[in-house]
Image: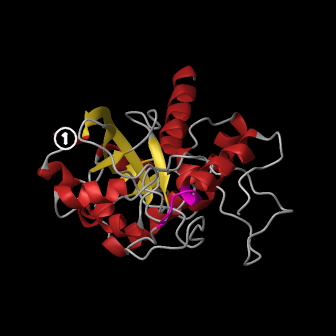
Amino acid sequence: MGKSVVLAADPSRLAASRLRFRCSSTSSTFRAGSRRSLPSGRLDRENRSTCPSAGPYPTPPQDPGRRGRDGAPGRVYRSPVLLFQKRFHEGLVSGDVTLTFRRWDRARVKPGGRYRCHPIGVLVVDRIERVRLADIAAADARRAGFASRDDLVDYIQSGPGGEIGGEAELFRVELHHGGEEDRVDLALEDQLSAADIEAIEARLARMDAKEPWTAATLALIEEHPRVVASRLAKMVGRETAPFKVDVRKLKKLGLTQSFEIGYEISPRGRAYLAAVAARRGRL
């Protein structure tokens, strides 16, 4: 019988224990992208997003004294996580999947919230509401990434709790892809100290040493979000390839985020620009 109790007072470790128990207590755990079941009580280590009703759960800080069977420390997320099986990732990024149904006991996301989904980046929740299973339409099932309503119901019932009746309530969550993984945690940090502002300014000054471009590029992206890079480059009279290289430099500082089409100023970038504007207003 697997261990399911963590003898520690650390709330983050207790939360992680609950997540392991939720996903391992079901009689069948499904590997992402397939229907192959695993023995009861066993969690697929390589596909931890397989629990249909799981998430978002913050992963606890890394404990140097505890390592996985491969000897590597666990992944650390500083932002909340919304879990999806691998087979849904492509649709989430492309925009074909904009809906998910969750068998939660309470709402675990909120409208406007940004939730990490490894490895595709960030998902933004647009709306959440309770609905009856019987009221879910075939169109909603397709928006959730299923070929039919029956496939969606089968998937829901494959998770903890087993079969449910038509009167049972689920959480209907509308969402969209909010940017790729690179520097996601950094990009979401919008509480900047004076030292943070100074450090960003110093990095940008070094980038501008030969020829100033960072402020103009940030302003361009702010004014034209999610516009294809070739059009942005043309607006400032630049070739597309070197323009994209420069934007990646800004992304490494957490100031921008990339999307399927174009870019946006990240929460960190907006906080930085607001701080700079406020300081200039005081001069």
State which region is magenta: 23-29
Left or right: where 21 falls relative to 86: right
Helix, strand or loop under label 1: helix
Q: Main secondary structure of the magenta part?
A: loop
Residue under label 1: 134
Residue 71, by quadrant, is bottom right
Q: Amino acid at mark 1?
A: Ala
Quadrant including the C terminus = top right
Q: How is the image coloured?
A: secondary structure
The x, y position of residue 255, in whole percent, is: 51, 50
Residue 119 appears in the picture as rendered: yes
Specify whether residue 219 is in view: no
**What residue is drawn where x is 43% and y is 70%?**
32
Name which residue lies at 44% across and 50% down: 53
Q: Is residue 43 above or below residue 108?
A: below
Determine if the magenta segment contains residue 90: no
Taking the magenta stretch, the answer to whether it contains residue 25 is yes
Rendered residue at 49%/41% (across/down): 267
Coordinates of residue 137 in the picture (x, y in percent): 14, 46
Specify few, some or many for label 1: CA neighbours under 10 Å numbering under 14, 14-19, or 20 or more: few
